[in-house]
Amino acid sequence: MPRSRLLAIVLLGFASMPPAALAEAPLELKSVTVELPFGDKVFPRAPGADEVSRNCLFCHSAGMLLYQPALSKSAWIKIIDKMIDVYKAPVVEADIPAIVNYLTDLEAK
Amino acid sequence: MREDRAPHPLITRRLLLGAGAMGGLALLAKPSWAETMVDLPLPGGPGQRSISTAFPEKGAMILQRTRAPLLETPFDVFDQGVFTPNDRFYVRWHWPVIPVSVDAETFALKIGGHVNKPLSLSLKDLLKDFPRVELAAVNQCSGNSRGFFEPRVAGGEWANGAMGNALWAGVRLKDILDRAGVKSGAVQVRFTGLDQALGPEAPRFVKSLDLDHARDGEVMIAYAMNGAQLPLLNGFPLRLVVPGWFSTYWIKMLDDIEVLDQPDTNFWMKTAYKIPDTPGADMKPGETGVPMVPISTMIPRSFLTNHSSGETVAAGAPLLVRGIAFGGDCGVERVDISTDGGKTWISTELGKDEGKYGFRQWQASLTPEPGNFSVMVRCTNENGLAQPGTANWNPGGYMRNVIESTDLVAA
């Protein structure tokens, strides 16, 4: 790697700071009503996609699963067990094998 | 990509089941995103994420999860100054049952449990009856940068943007507790927000602090960040601020404070958010028998913010490098950079100190010779703790603070 030289530090100015800007005027807190998006993506079609869709989207949107790294089958089984045992996710037991297979091979889909 | 919107996230199981398979719901999708993509450099991928502007009171954010929202701050925001704008401040919720409407007139903060005089305080009470305090403090997700763990671990696959720094304004928790009168025998204080778990048997997201910590005069209940009321997704109207501690303790939409005479054993304290009880929360993948403890204080980090890996810069000309650093549970002592792989380090100039718990800017100038080079940045905090040269690992993906390196080309 070619050497790069560090020079004496010169003051070139820090990034402009947004003013901390606490106005002296008393703060008034106003009621808020918002709308939150519900869900983003759909699962790529492949065997098991229906089982994943109907069991996993009750608590969270699809991105939670689609953005996971490649995980082993045993890791997915542990995760699904945790969702059921700890977070009380309403997962249909008969669907679990299809869910595990789908998620284990997710990057291929 | 498609997006379906429901008018309200407070869906019931009946509604969901009545709609049949979610695939059916997705057919009702109305594209509503103004979106572009970003590719986060997560080892092994997937790194593609949308940039979303679909969330209330929020600007462009990296969409990690729509429901419950996980929104990451795009990293260029950290180059704009030490205070992270409210509309770009990252968002992280555990459960999707988040109130979408909060009435500032009727909202009440309740203080009860092991106290002499249970209280119910309105927002006006908090604004009028207690001294207002202000503090700059970094709020960082325990799992910030989890996506860089190798081997990878499950969870929210954040890059480095699950953090932000704000000037918080509010009241001291100590003042509130003193008003209620903590009874002798109290040991901890538990905090609950307005969000709820899905179903009565699932564990609501609650956290506790030891009584001495809760009464240290620094822990505060914030009603403002950066001079404005909090965005709903950052916890409007009240958020616990625990300076120097990871964000898991900074309960959002705080409406219930309970003084406990027994240590809290709820799931979120006893089981979740545990780290190995080792320096830097480090262990080997697959290692067993490691004692685990609840995550607590933050450790130093620093980042280069005005250039990204892969950029080409001018060779033979002065190059300004700058960024942000924070000390964790104390201030920044120094920030050094290295361009020779860590063999030699040169100190940088620090920007204005806005408070020991906040971001601190640093900058330096270097003149690169033609070719590839890397700029490593290392923060040493006021306790003498420096960022390590090797990344930690633990199964939760918590507390990453390895020295960051930015790879540039000079031509």
Image (cartoon, rainbow, N blue to C red):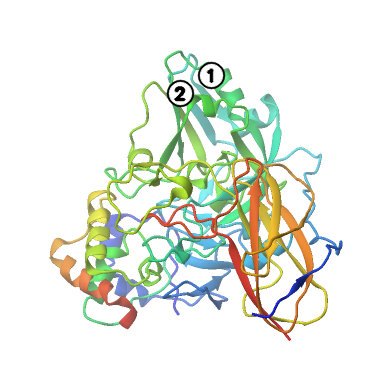
Residue picked out by circle 2: B112
Residue picked out by circle 1: B180
Q: Residue at x 71, y 50 (%)?
A: B334
Chain that bears disc 1: B
Identify whether A38 is placed above or below A24: below
Q: Residue at x 56, y 42 (%)?
A: B103
Closest to the observer: B279 or B175? B279
Q: Is B91 placed left or right of A29 in the picture?
A: left
Closest to the observer: B205 or B262? B262
Q: Is B329 placed left or right of A109 in the picture?
A: right
Closest to the observer: B99 or B36? B36
Identify whether B335 is placed above or below B135: below
Q: Is residue A28 visible?
A: yes
Q: Residue at x 82, y 68 (%)?
A: A7
Q: The N terminus of chain B lies in which quarter of the figure?
A: bottom left
Identify whether B236 is placed above or below A46: above
Q: Is B266 placed left or right of B228 in the picture?
A: left
The three-letter code of the residue at mark 1 reads Ala
Of mark 1 and mark 2, the one earlier in the sequence is 2
Q: Are marks 1 and 2 in contact (CB under 8 Å)?
A: yes
How many residues crowd mark 2 within 10 Å: few (<14), some (14–19), many (20+)?
Answer: many
Q: Is residue B65 visible?
A: no
Q: Residue furthest front?
A: B343
Q: Position of residue B380 (x, y in %)?
A: 65, 49
